[in-house]
Image (cartoon, rainbow, N blue to C red):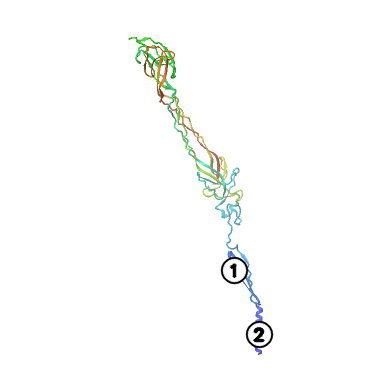
Amino acid sequence: MSRLARTGAGAAIALAVVGCLFPEYTFDETSSGGGGATTTSSSSTTSSGSQTTTTGVASGGGGAGGMSPEEDCFTAGDEDGDQLADCADPDCEPDVECVDSIPVGWGGIGYVALFRGTAGADPACPPGTETVVYTGNATLQNTSASCTSCGCAAPAWSSCELYEDFDTNAAGLQALYPGNQTCGSFTGTNGTLTVPSPWAPNVCTALGPYPGGNTCGSPGPAVPCNAYVDIGLARPFNGSCASTGGAPANASPTWQDEVKACRVVEGLGGCTAPQACVPKPQGVYEPRICIGRAGDQTCPGAFTQLTTAHGDFDDTRDCTGCSCGAATGGSCTLNVTLYSDAGCNTPVGSGSSNTCAMLNGNPAVQRGRTTVVTPPSGGSCPVVPGGGQPTGGVTETDPTTFCCLP
């Protein structure tokens, strides 16, 4: 009985001691959330019973799916927060560069990306540019000058005239020759008749007077002196000659190349003054930064690569005039009627030019009249050498000079 009591009491003491040595236990557990965040849980157990309390504490990364910002190389600033802006940021090395400052007098359009290529291409401005600041042209084609050959049209004649002179020793034109035999066999004559030169058609014209009623023929039988009249040759006169040709035969000038400039964005950082940070031209644009200035200029400083563009051209190509000499040749026929009275009322004979006409009754001759039988035609006008030569040329105007870094 006493042994059992002592044993029970000892066991009770032992249990009491154990309960006092371990009053509570604590366990910490850590779990990971998305994006590198962590959560800490705490659990407590007391001697009075089993009770657990969990407390979540978030810490660590930027949340689920977080990404670092990127540098915008064509916008001023340090967008990715690495303390390196634009030209100083290795991320931008393919796209931007530090270049010399624009020389004095060349800042009108700023730094530009320059295109020179096939006319009409009109490429879009490349990345890193703001706006088109120039469009023009380069290299004119079809600028040679030529002219059509000079020539002369057929003469335009005023009228027809007698021109054969039967007596070159007498003053004036002796184109009528009365005689006593068939023309070409005259044995005696009172002389020739002087006619006007030119003799206007259809005008009753004084020719003498030339006496009538005489006989001629010594030696030999006497015959009327005025039996026939030899009428001289006729020809066109006072011809005008119109020149032909001598006109420009030029192709219209055209431009081989188009020139276009786009201003690059400004204000980028990352370069040591006085240099500036600018975008590198891309695509079909020149692979170097350029500057520009109106007029025909010499490139300044380090900007040594020259391109001259033009806005227009002046075409002054022409030809020297063509001219023609005096008209020659041609043919015509006149009819000549002779009259014995002063009013051209009593005709005594008539005939065509270059014929032998009969006269009636060995008459006196006072007047004459001509009419045109065959109008003048034909003939030619000689070309005067030296005409139809090219003059002038094609000149590019309105220049603008672009200078690029090598």
Residue kind at label 1, given as amino acid type: Ser
Residue 34 is at least partly visible in this image: yes
Secondary element type, mark 2? helix
Q: In this view, does 53 lie above or below 121?
A: below
Residue for point 65% across, 86% down? 8
Q: Is there CB contact under 8 Å for labels 2 and 1? A: no
Q: Is residue 213 toward the left or the right of residue 64 in the image?
A: left
Residue 1 or residue 331, whichever sits in front? 331
Tell me the mark number nearer the camera, choosing from 2 and 1: 1
Residue 210, x across and y down, in percent: 41, 12
Q: Is residue 129 above or below residue 380?
A: below
Location of the N terminus (image quadrant): bottom right
Amino acid type of the residue tagged 2 in the rendering = Gly
Say which mark, if any, is on residue 31. 1
Residue at which label 2 appears: 10
One can see residue 169 in this view: no
Q: Which of 289/178 is in front?
A: 178
Q: Which of 233 and 89 is in front in this view?
A: 233
Q: What percent of the width, then of the height, locates residue 380?
A: 41, 26
